[in-house]
Image: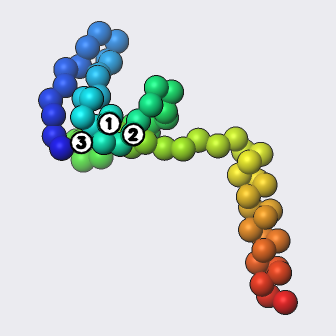
């Protein structure tokens, strides 16, 4: 789906409603924005606290140790 949007004051853009709906985006969602080869890419991302990620790493390690027995 391609749509045209306008760059507004303070470099703001509006993501077209069709795209917001298709990707099930909600207010407050995090989006990664980067440039590659002259194109702007906007990608929805999940952001988790470091403590949560550390806990997942420990759980994965615990499960791996159990699988090696």
Residue depicted at 26% across the width and 14% down the height = 8
| 8 is higher (above) or lower (below) than 17 | above
Q: Check disc 2 and report its element: helix, strand or loop.
A: loop
Of circles 1 and 3, which is in front?
A: 1
Cβ atoms at labels 1 and 3 below 8 Å apart: no
Q: In front: 25, or 33? A: 25
- Residue 34 visible here: no
Cβ atoms at labels 2 and 1 below 8 Å apart: yes
Q: Which mark sits nearer the N-terminus, 2 or 3?
A: 2
Q: CA distance from mark 1 to mark 3?
A: 23 Å
| 27 is higher (above) or lower (below) than 44 | above
Which residue is under mark 1? 21
Q: Which mark sits nearer the N-terminus, 1 or 3?
A: 1
Quarter of the figure with the N terminus: top left
Using the image, tell me which numbered label, if any, was put on residue 24.
2
Residue depicted at 30% across the width and 46% down the height = 36
Badge 2: residue crowd in 10 Å (few <14, some 14–19, many ≥20): few
């Amino acid at each position: 789906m391609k749509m045209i949007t306008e760059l507004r004051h303070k470099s703001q853009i509006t993501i077209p409603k069709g795209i917001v709906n298709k990707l099930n985006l909600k207010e407050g969602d995090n989006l990664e924005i980067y440039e590659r080869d002259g194109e702007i890419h906007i990608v929805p991302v999940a952001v988790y606290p470091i403590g949560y990620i550390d806990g997942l790493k420990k759980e994965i390690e615990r499960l791996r140790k159990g699988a090696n027995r």
